[in-house]
Amino acid sequence: MKPVVDFVHSIGEVVDKLTLPSRQKKQLESELSQMIYTLEERIASEQAVVLREEARGNWLQRSWRPLVMLTFAFIILIGIFTDLPLLADTSRFWDLLEIGLGGYLIGRSGEKIAGHIFHPKKN
């Protein structure tokens, strides 16, 4: 807000230097100030839209967990019909799947709970 106020004062100084009647100077200064404040409001609203969109994230940020779990499911499905050494009983794949399920279920639930705690909806 300070830069806008400084800019309006600068405009006022420039208008004062003009050789116009005082009534026209006041009108010119008022119109210029109004245009600047309107522009500032427009910039602030556009900035709010950009910040809101950025906070939501893009498609990949929202979808990486389901994609990982679908990949795991696809590997298991392929393993049913073929002999994959990845799916042997001694494989670390099952540990990874266990961590993935825990992180997916607990992590996502934790995010939703934290969202309700820290950002309650207004009635």
Image: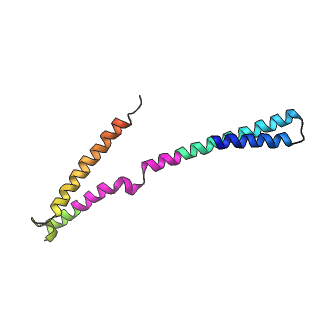
Report x, y in % for residue 44: 58, 43
92 sits to left or right of 107: left
Report x, y in % for residue 87: 14, 66
Report x, y in % for residue 38: 67, 40
88 sits to left or right of 46: left
Q: Is residue 63 magenta?
A: yes
| Residue 84 visible, this angle | no
54 sits to left or right of 18: left
Residue at 15%, 60% in the rendered image: 94
Corner quadrant of residue 111 = top left
Q: How is the image coloured?
A: rainbow
Residue at 89%, 35% in the rendered image: 21
Q: Is residue 118 magenta?
A: no
Residues rendered magenta in the picture? 49-72
Corner quadrant of residue 110 = top left
Image quadrant where one finds the C terminus: top left
Classified by dominant secondary structure, the portion drawn in magenta counts as helix
